[in-house]
Amino acid sequence: MIAYADQADDIESGRQAMHKILSEKVPFSGLLTYNDWVAIGAMQTLQSATLETPRDVAVIGFDDRLQARVQDPPSRPFAIQRLTWATSRSWH
């Protein structure tokens, strides 16, 4: 399932998208977000819905921000060196 929010890059967007996902009432156990801000917002909404991370839903952010690592519990960030990633791909 994919959910979009208005801005898709901040905490409020994560909250909005997670509300949409939860309203569908489709079971899920993991979440991969566009960035850590969205992950933080999603985690806040999950907590409001009495779902625990990572026990009920594993959450992964995508840019390794300090703010995500100091959440309780922390999201699992995925850091990528953009220049390294871009130059390691063949663009043929």
Image: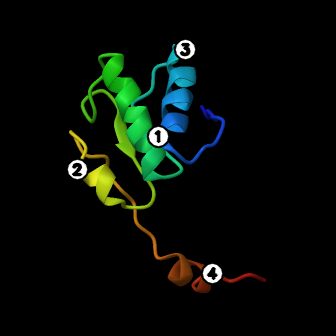
Residue 72: x percent and y percent? 21, 39
Helix, strand or loop at disc 1? helix
Q: Residue 64 appears in which quarter of the rendering?
A: bottom left
Residue identified by numbered label 1 = 11
Q: CA distance from mark 3 to mark 2?
A: 28 Å
Name the residue rendered at 39%, 30% in the picture.
29
> In this image, 87 relative to 28: left or right?
right
Label 4: few (<14), some or many (≥20) within 10 Å?
Answer: few
Name the residue rendered at 31%, 53% in the picture.
67
Residue identified by numbered label 3 = 23
- Quick one: label 2 or label 1, which is nearer the N terminus? 1
Q: CA distance from mark 3 to mark 1?
A: 18 Å
Q: Are marks 1 and 4 in contact (CB under 8 Å)?
A: no
Q: Where, quadrant-wise, is the C terminus in this rendering? A: bottom right
Q: Amino acid at mark 3?
A: Ser
> In this image, 15 relative to 70: left or right?
right
Q: Is residue 3 visible?
A: yes
Q: CA distance from mark 1 to mark 4?
A: 31 Å
- Quick one: label 3 or label 2, which is nearer the N terminus? 3
Q: CA distance from mark 2 to mark 4?
A: 33 Å
Q: Residue 39 appears in which quarter of the rendering?
A: top left
Is residue 82 or residue 14 the one in the foreground? 14
Q: Residue furthest bottom?
A: 87
Residue identified by numbered label 4 = 89
Tell me the number on the disc at residue 71.
none
Name the residue rendered at 22%, 40% in the picture.
73
Residue 75: x percent and y percent? 31, 46
Q: Is residue 22 above or below residue 67?
A: above
Q: Amino acid at mark 4?
A: Arg
